[in-house]
Each structure stands twice: as C-alpha cells, then as structure tokens.
Image: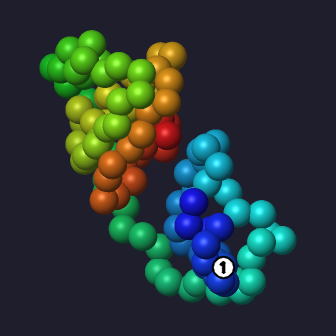
Amino acid sequence: MVLKIVKKIIIEVNSSVPKCWGGNGESIHISKVDYIVEGNGPPLIELPEVSISEVDKKLGARVMKEIPDGACLQLGIGAIPNVIGAMIAQLDLKDLGVHTEMLADSCFTVF
C-alpha cells in the first residue's frame, strides 16, 4: 500500500464529492494524516436519471449470467448499467472490483 512508503499524508475534505462506502481497507485513520486541505470546489456534474425499459431489464439479466465472483467491472452511463448495478446489489456476488473513470449511480449500490 502506498501509505506505507510515503513521507507525508495529505487528504482533501470536500463536501461536494459524493461518498461511496466500501470496506476493503480504503480508509485512513486521522492519526496517520499530516495535513488536511479543505476543498471548496463546485458540486460534481450529475447526469439525469434514465428510465428503464423491459428490454433493458432483459439485457441486464443476460449479462448477470456472465458475472462470476471476483469479477472486475466497468459500469458506464445509462439504463443497462444501472439495471446491472441494481441486480448485483440484490445478489450474493463477492469480491467485485470496479474499473471506471466515473462513479455512475450503479456503482454506489454495488461497490
């Protein structure tokens, strides 16, 4: 882990950034932090919610059959990624990873 080799730990606290709770050791205890910077940037861009059709649900169900425990996923924008995220949240898949340039709504229910 990078935190074991760096000389100083600086964190940014920014209420404009969404919170996504995990559980795989991504937390930093405050006693380990050297400096705290308060961010005051504007809220992040939010995309409008998309409507989900029956076709989206059927496609999502087909994709779900291909996702094993331990998969690393990239969920993008739109109805189908949101359907897949909602379906994953209802199942017992374990050790999932995410590879993404953004946090879509589906990521918040899954990861």
Q: Nearer the viewer, residue 53 or 81?
A: 81
- Crowding around mark 1 (Cα neighbors within 10 Å: few <14, some 14 to 19, many 20+) is few
* Image vertical order of residue 13 relative to residue 20, above or below: below
The image's colouring method is rainbow
Q: Nearer the viewer, residue 109 or 9?
A: 9
- Asked if residue 17 lies left or right of residue 87, the reply is right
Please identify the quadrant where the N terminus is shown: bottom right
Residue drawn at 72 percent across, 86 percent down: 35
Q: Which kind of residue does numbered mark 1 sit on?
A: Ile
* Image vertical order of residue 94 relative to residue 110, above or below: above
- Asked if residue 57 lies left or right of residue 39, the reply is left
Residue drawn at 70 percent across, 63 percent down: 28
- The residue that label 1 is drawn on is 9
Q: Is residue 16 visible?
A: yes
Percent position (x, y) of residue 94? 50, 24
Could you say whether the residue bearing mark 1 is in a helix, strand or loop? loop
